[in-house]
Image (spheres, rainbow, N blue to C red):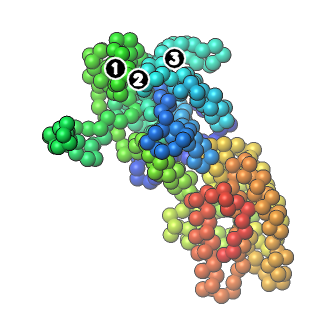
Amino acid sequence: MQGDNCDPDRPAHPGIFPAGEAGQSDHQPAELSVDFPVSVVLPAGGTGERTGLQTPKQFCSFLGRPLISYTIQAFERVSWIQSIVVVVAKENLDLMTDIIQRFQHRKVRVVPGGSTRHRSICNGVLALGEQEEGERLPTDRPKVVIIHDAVRPFVEEAFLYKIAMAAKEQGAAGAIRPLVSTVIATTSEGYLDHSLERAKYRASEMPQGFTYDVIYQAYQRCTESDFEFGTECLHLALQYCGTNAKLIEGPPTLWKVTYKRDLAAAESIIKETLSRSACVITGGSAQAVTLADAFQKAAGALDMELDVVPDLMGDNGRYLSKEWNFIQVSVNHSCLSEVESLLMDLEAANRALLHPLVVIWVHLSCSDELSISRKMPEPAAIMDMASSAKLQNILVYAIQLHQSKDTERWERSVLRVAEITSALIRERSPALVGQLLQA
């Protein structure tokens, strides 16, 4: 079954894994075919006590979006997943609804959770068999239900496919990972009782998949004790339905945001992926092309790929829908019109809905006839433009560069521009928007 695709007006997801960690993430993945309905339940009712923050971790924001929005998007971009049920505490229903509306999530339904994890998941499973008035949800129950933690945003379609297919075949399937540390048992007095053989055991992870009938029946048959103290869905399927789950070793990217430091790690992963490349727009100027060529060599040493184009017309317009970083080079004139035109194009393309875009204006002065101060616009004009763009989640910075006739000095300046640009793109700091930096 081919599920509904995301709204074509929404920007594509950039892929959210560092190189080498998720296989084909750097490229468009091959289309995976699933001929049965698949839905997702995301329990998101946790309080986040272990993060030490007042806000539950699933609602903590970085790069302008709450963590749970990234997780929803990871599933929403999978065409064969037809619906997503997010289960939240009753006091967070309005907050979750606002997140869905703000980031235009299309496949999502929100339901209230229970007092424990299993009660919340059960509510989500039951909701998949119901038709909510006014919602464009399928009338039939899904064949397979994937259960995943709302605080595990880094899950790839290829692994979801493995879980879904194994669940359909076996009735249940789950992700596992090798144990990092040895597990030991202690006596009541606090002494070592025994240790487990680490090679024999695995850590149970998410996602997990079940046929709808298996997970539904498991929750219908389980005890109050299971609801109150249990945490493992695969165990319920085995105990109450006799379904022995297929265990599939997952990639290291399945880790869970548990502590405050994990939020910083998640932000770093997404920043790294967004900063792998940039589009340099020269306007066709020979001096700008020369700078861009030198810039390309310097940026290559910083692990950033640059595509150089004269403009974003015709075929080059594809960069508006695939790139997250733009460098506009202007030569010997102080008009901001080129940058303003680029900002208008980006806003029209709705590119900054899910991730902040970076636009860096590089002003190259090649003549000594005018003073540098007369060639540049007033800092206030740059700041006003950047402040307006920031409201649209577009981060604008400016760099001033004077072309030197001294070859060695010029090469140092180009390297500085590359280093500054790389830092601005990687950090994506809202605090620095509108700043005019000197190279």
Figure quadrant of the C terminus: bottom right
Work out whether residue 364 or residue 99 is closer to the camera in this orientation and state it. Answer: 99
Horizontally, is 170 left or right of 23 in the view? left
**Above/below status of 273 relative to 424:** above
> What amino acid does circle 3 point to?
Ala
Counting from the top left corner in percent of width and height, residue 359 is at 69, 58
User: Which residue is denoted by mark 3 in the rendering?
Assistant: 127
Who's the residue at 72% across and 73% down the image? 400
> What amino acid does circle 2 point to?
His
Residue lying farthest to the front in this orientation: 189
Who's the residue at 63% across and 28% down the image? 94
Name the N-terminal-most of marks 2 and 3.
2
Name the N-terminal-most of marks 1 and 3.
3
| Badge 1 element | helix
Who's the residue at 26% across and 22% down the image? 244
User: Which residue is denoted by mark 2 in the rendering?
Assistant: 118
Counting from the top left corner in percent of width and height, residue 24 is at 44, 46
Q: Residues within 10 Å of mark 2 (few under 14, many from 20)?
A: many
Counting from the top left corner in percent of width and height, residue 358 is at 66, 56
The answer for how far apart the CA atoms under marks 1 and 3 are is: 20 Å
Work out whether residue 429 or residue 46 is closer to the camera in this orientation and state it. Answer: 46
**Above/below status of 18 relative to 209:** below
Asked whether disc 2 touches disc 1, contact meaning CB atoms under 8 Å apart, the reply is yes
Counting from the top left corner in percent of width and height, residue 143 is at 43, 18
User: Which residue is denoted by mark 1 in the rendering?
Assistant: 226
The part of the image, by quadrant, that contains residue 36 is top left
| Badge 2 element | helix
